[in-house]
Image (cartoon, helix red, strand yellow):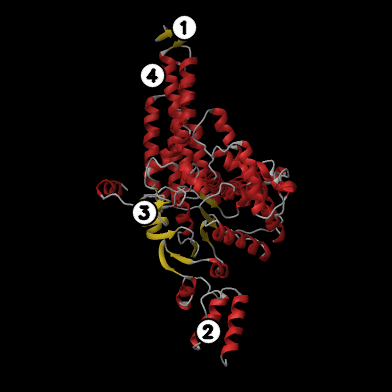
Amino acid sequence: MSKSRSNKVTAPSFTVPDNCAIYCKDVNFVYNPKTPFQKQALNNVSLTVNKGEFVAVVGHTGSGKTTFVQHLNALIRLQSGRMYVLGRDLGDKKLDLKALRGEVGMVFQYPEYQLFADTVLQDVSFGLKNFGVDKDKRVQLARDAIQLVGLDFDKVKDKSPFDMSGGEKRRVALAGVLAMNPSILVMDEPTAGLDPRGKSEILSLVAQLNRERNVTVVMVSHDMNEVYENADRVIVFADGAVAYDDTPRNLFRFETQIEEMNLEVPAMAQFANVLEANGITLPDNCKTVRQMYDAVTALRGKADV
Amino acid sequence: MFRDVTFGQYYPADSFVHKMDARIKLVLSLLFMVGIFFVVSYVGFAVITLYLLVVIALARVPLKSVLKSVKGIIFLLLLTAIINVFFTKGAGEPLLSWWKIEIYTEGLIFASKMLLRLTYLVIGSSILTLTTTPVDLTHAVESLLKPLRVIKFPVHEFALIMSLTLSFIPSLMEETDRIIRAQKARGADFDTGGLVKRAKAFVPILIPLLVGGFRRADELANAMNSRCYEGATKRTRMRKMRLGWRDAVASVIVVVLFAAIFTVYGMQSAWGGIIWLYY
């Protein structure tokens, strides 16, 4: 650690490109250093995420992906290496944590377990209150966020979050993060434990935020189908290091390697791979069953397949 | 935030003490805890210090992690010592006197010994928990309480409650850690502000923690019911506890040591004044 500090002094000042939301170079992290519980969670991780990108982070349990994403809003402080998020140096000891956390919204696994307030409105405005937003503005932002996640503000605002269904609770928790209008949204398995409908609603909301508000999305997921459908790029973690960093289409061509890392190949990618093996090339946007159907029908119209 | 709490955390190692039977370790620890209150002279404390150092060396546990558990309650220890200094009245002239506060030599001696005693008490019990897994400890308690079955005391249920409590501590800590992170991510601040503000800052942690605790308890009860758990009836154990040569050796040494302590100090208090020779 002291080594990286001394490096920082002598190294020429570094500027992150403007369109770069997240920049990491040689990031290492060790849990419980110098004890029998010592564990190297991140091993020379280097990657960049551009502004407005939708990046999926995948990997087997214990591959370091959760440790990595928790670095992004300095919940875990940088041990060694360099990391810049929205131009802020995460290695800086005087880093303004509050400002960073206002810009990087983080949705944890099962976020509904963190609800605590008496009413939905209070819970959603908790973050805003912490960031010093005044009361009228708070209510307005909370209203926007609650409506954004598809709940009726007037109906739910005075309800206790504990009286709601699982899916509704998750949306309230999500609204609590979205209310702060983060420019990077980091999510750790946002759809875990939801039914298929709840899943697709959350995902289309996230995709909409990414598309319409240009929010940079970093999503940890175990569901390769949702990764394939939504992400612009997939980063595969294995044993604390970045194993692959590619577009979903390119990545899932490596079927054997993917399965060796205990990940599954999405159904549509398998289908496209089989077609490709038989000399049929599809456009890259065949990510859902619908798109695949349309592409295949179009091909049939053109040629004699 | 709660990462530093090591009290009760098992330290895996392959050592003499780790291999001992949990029941023997528990009984000897209790003997130690009682015995430490009989020690009144600095010579006695020197013997106890030596004893603890030998045990720690035999347990192959780093001194640092043993001392960490003392660090956790250092405030309590110092408070006790300070109160003892102020409230012990001595026979002669006060060493220091200011307003209503008088400090006597006896107070300082008494407080220093109380401090040593409590510190050693914590060290002794943390050696037990550092070298014994919670599961073994529960089995030891269950096994030792067996005679109480005669008076219809629910020994097995008691042990079960104890083991569940112990096994839920790490997961509750993890949960606490996660909730703290989640609230921090929403800009919560636990480290600045006055006492009231800080106390209020804990509400967003405590409520989800309580809700989660009830949820876990409920889930656990369902899981146990659906696997037809019905208490102690006809349950057998996968790992039987057996006494070995280590237990015999350790028992003999520790019992002899504390028998000596009981005789020396017990007789002294019977003879009254002789104690003062040691001051």
Callout in the foreground (1, 3): 3
Please determine if labels 3 and 4 lie on a single subunit. no
Indicate whether A270 appears above or below B11.
Answer: below
Please determine if labels 3 and 2 lie on a single subunit. yes
Q: Which residue is mark 2?
A: A274
Q: Which residue is mark 4?
A: B279
Which type of secondary structure does the marked residue at label 2 adopt?
helix
Q: Which residue is mark 3?
A: A16
- Which chain hosts label 2? A
Is residue B183 left or right of B149 when viewed as pictured? left
**Amino acid type at mark 3:** Val
Q: Which residue is mark 1?
A: B99
- Which chain hosts label 4? B
Indicate whether A240 appears above or below A118.
Answer: below
Callout in the foreground (4, 2): 2
Is residue A303 left or right of B49 when viewed as pictured? right
Q: Residue at x 45, y 26 (%)?
A: B78
**Amino acid type at mark 2:** Val
